[in-house]
Amino acid sequence: MKIYFYSGYLKGLAFIVLSVMAFVPSVFAQWSSPQTLFQGTAVPEPGPFWVSPVIVTEKDPSGVIHLVWTNKVTDERNVLAHASYANGVWSQMEILPSDVNSSAMVPSIAISSDGRLHVTYTCFLPNGSWGIVYTSKPTGGQWSQPVLVSGNEYLFNAYPQLFIDAQQDPHVIYVAYAENGESTLLKHIKFSASNPAQVTQLTVPANTDQAFNPRVVKSQDGTIHCFWYRTSNDDSSIEHASLTGNSWSATNIIADSQNSSFMDESAIVPVATPSDEVYAVWYDIEDNAGNSKHYAPTEGWDQITRIDDPGFVMGSGISDNANYIHLTGNVNDLMNDIYDLKYHFFNGTQWTHEIIEQSTSSELPAFPALAINGDTLFCFYTRVFESGGSELAMSYRILDHLTPVANIPVNKEIALKVSPNPFHSSSVISFVAGKKGEVRFILTDALGRNETASIQVQETGVNAINLHSIFPRAHRKGVYILKIVTPYGTDAVTLIK
């Protein structure tokens, strides 16, 4: 087990029935050119072990995106900065309060139902120890004075992961190190925003000695999913446990050194979908590729899926309202000095990959964080320059499958049908295409959850495609609405499973 933080710049660091249809990903827009945010900011530069996060994002109940990042003051000191984004306009950047003799890094953010911002981070303290510090800001108010919440039992505490419980109290899961930096423990604490100095120690999952670099994600039903790396007797693994109320589930090993090679300084990326499914994605250093594993509440964990793309170092992930997965990360090609910032999209059946920004001999993009607002996906990241200096940057793209369709007129000549209905794995969607080109399908269940897929129509007239080939996850019993969206109108049909 190693402890590494920033240490200098690493240089270079169908089924087809009547006509031919090609199933294609449902994201078609391109990434915008990078924009510099808050001219003059200086973010930390990647060191040889790429510790993250540097940037964290969260959306509040009113839809405002909040960005918190580590801002470099000197080579020895960092502070945290915050800004918010609403209706296309950024707020002024503000610096969170901190001790002038301390240095902040590795932030985590959560927002309670009343809009209060909660932030924890690792802090280098004047006495040479590392502590977990907490601050918060109510809507329309000021940031509270930072409070050390990790206590004095251990000299080194790091990698805080913050979440809010049903009573709106903050919880933090973090790693505590023994003095030699080799032995670690997972810690779990709780406190109130009004009195963060009054900390309650809570139970942790089983078998969390030698845990490292934990990551937490909260599903829609309130379940907390915690992932961490663990080394025991020279064997490494990725492990998971879930917290419901006050009770942890049994610990599951979801990957080990027999089926994956870990870069444990590179974060595990957990993503929870609106349908309470969970994905865990990590970088396999031996295969130079991504690996993922999927959890469904009624089915448990499936097998590891290899993602044949190397851009998963220091990743970030998010799900949209259609249950699709969006990830970013860096390529880690030391041999060829390639560290491109990549985007990965998973529509439930296949992964696609794009470059957000290429690395060059003079510039390195790194440490991405994602946010979605309406039908727009934002990627915030750092840009580090070989000539010296660094900046905070943003790129964005439109998610076509989330674009509103309410203003497109109904066209019954499309004659959308599904047969047989009630549907099963052999049911076929048929429709009349007025033009060649892209058409989009939106499948909505009784809870209002959407899945979206797009196909390219090669011939006008009657077309058909197997429903399960484009909506393989539509397996729950119930009533669904299937809508087709085309340039010449929409049509819809009710389905029963």
Image (spheres, grey):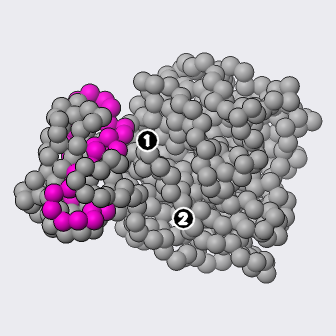
- Name above or below for residue 300 compared with residue 7: above
Name the residue located 39 percent from the left edge and 58 percent from the top edge.
24
User: Of the residues shown, which amino acid type is indicated by label 1?
Assistant: Thr
43 displayed left or right of 436: right
The residue indicated by pointer 2 is 354
Q: Per the image, is 426 magenta?
A: no
Residues in magenta? 456-485
Q: How many marks?
A: 2
Q: Considering the image in quadrants, where does the C terminus appear?
A: top left
- Name above or below for residue 468 compared with residue 96: above
User: Of the residues shown, which amino acid type is indicated by label 2?
Assistant: Glu
| Image coordinates for residue 439, horizontal then vertical, percent | 26, 61
483 displayed left or right of 267: left
* Residue that extends furthest to the right in the rendered view of this protein: 180
Q: Per the image, is 472 magenta?
A: yes
| Image coordinates for residue 346, horizontal then vertical, percent | 47, 50
Q: Which mark is residue 273?
A: 1
Kind of element beneath mark 2: strand
Q: Which mark is residue 239?
A: none
- Name above or below for residue 170 compared with residue 28: above
| Image coordinates for residue 87, horizontal then vertical, percent | 37, 67
Q: Can see residue 136?
A: no
Rate crowding at label 1 as few (under 14), some (14 to 19) or many (20 or more) other CA atoms within 10 Å: some
Q: Residue 109 or 27: which is nearer the viewer? A: 27
* Residue that extends furthest to the front in the rendered view of this protein: 18
Sequence-first disc among 2 and 1: 1
Name the residue located 16 percent from the left edge and 54 percent from the top edge.
431
> Marks 1 and 2: in contact by CB < 8 Å?
no
| Image coordinates for residue 120, horizontal then vertical, percent | 64, 45
- Nearer mark to the viewer, of 2 and 1: 2
Name the residue located 28 percent from the left edge and 65 percent from the top edge.
458
